[in-house]
Image: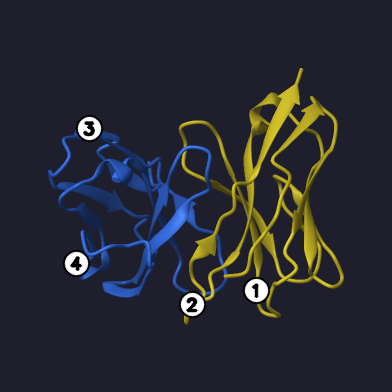
Chain colours: A yellow, B blue
Amino acid sequence: DAKTTQPNSMESNEEEPVHLPCNHSTISGTDYIHWYRQLPSQGPEYVIHGLTSNVNNRMASLAIAEDRKSSTLILHRATLRDAAVYYCTLPGADNYGQNFVFGPGTRLSVLP
Amino acid sequence: DTGVSQNPRHKITKRGQNVTFRCDPISEHNRLYWYRQTLGQGPEFLTYFQNEAQLEKSRLLSDRFSAERPKGSFSTLEIQRTEQGDSAMYLCASSRRLGNTEAFFGQGTRLTVV
């Protein structure tokens, strides 16, 4: 399975932008990059996904490197509710590529 | 609430007992996934259904684990002869049939084997 590597933890001040990096050097050409986040005692929550172009939605932006070997999740103004574990995921290397492979993720702390 | 529903939320069982968890996906979602998550780790994929067909099973899924999705609606995950190493959060997710879309996760069932 293609692997992702992320920092174990990051800190941000409230209302400041946050850039969460992810390396995925073994990504295949057709693999979408998905980001999820998980609040304490909750299941993971979808954040954003993309293939090649940068993507924006109401929650975040996703910047994908030109060689697709890394990506960055951007939270434009962190709030206390954004404190969570953020996972960068790729499809599993099975016939269908339908499952997501999660690493340990980045634990984001947001300071008031 | 139209999200993914999992029951029970918590289960404590004695080693050697069988347990069964239920997942009700979002109604129009044909794809259903089971994941397992231990403390401090990301979710690990267990198995995947498209409608009622179980299309993939992880190597993590030992013979003691079985999953079903009769009629392509709700799904059950059964663990036979539970072991202490089975203690974990069991997560269910669903997604639409077509396209590369997001998955929606339930809140999980936390299993403790004593």
Label 1 and label 4 in one chain: no
The answer to whether mark 2 and mark 4 are in CB contact below 8 A is no
Binning the other alpha carbons within 10 Å of mark 1 as few (below 14), some (14 to 19) or many (20 upward) gives: some
- In the rendering, which numbered label is found on residue B70? 4
Q: Residue at x 77, y 30 (%)?
A: A11
**Percent x, y of residue B48:** 37, 67
**How far apart in space, not on screen, are marks 3 and 2 (Cα)?**
34 Å
- In the rendering, which numbered label is found on residue A31? 1
Binning the other alpha carbons within 10 Å of mark 2 as few (below 14), some (14 to 19) or many (20 upward) gives: few
Is the N terminus of chain A in the top left, top right, bottom left or bottom right quadrant?
Answer: bottom right
**How far apart in space, not on screen, are marks 2 and 4 (Cα)?**
24 Å
Q: What residue did someone put label 2 on?
A: A94
Q: Amino acid at mark 3?
A: Val
**Left or right: residue B49 compared with residue A91:** left
Q: Amino acid at mark 1?
A: Asp
Q: Residue at x 26, y 68 (%)?
A: B72
Instruction: Give whichever of discs 1 and 2 has the lower sequence position.
Output: 1
The answer to whether mark 3 and mark 1 are in CB contact below 8 A is no
Q: What residue did someone put label 3 on?
A: B114
Q: Amino acid at mark 4?
A: Pro
Q: Nearer the viewer, mark 3 or mark 4?
A: 3
The subunit letter for the residue under badge 3 reads: B
Residue A24, visible in the rendered structure: yes
Q: Residue at x 76, y 17 (%)?
A: A112
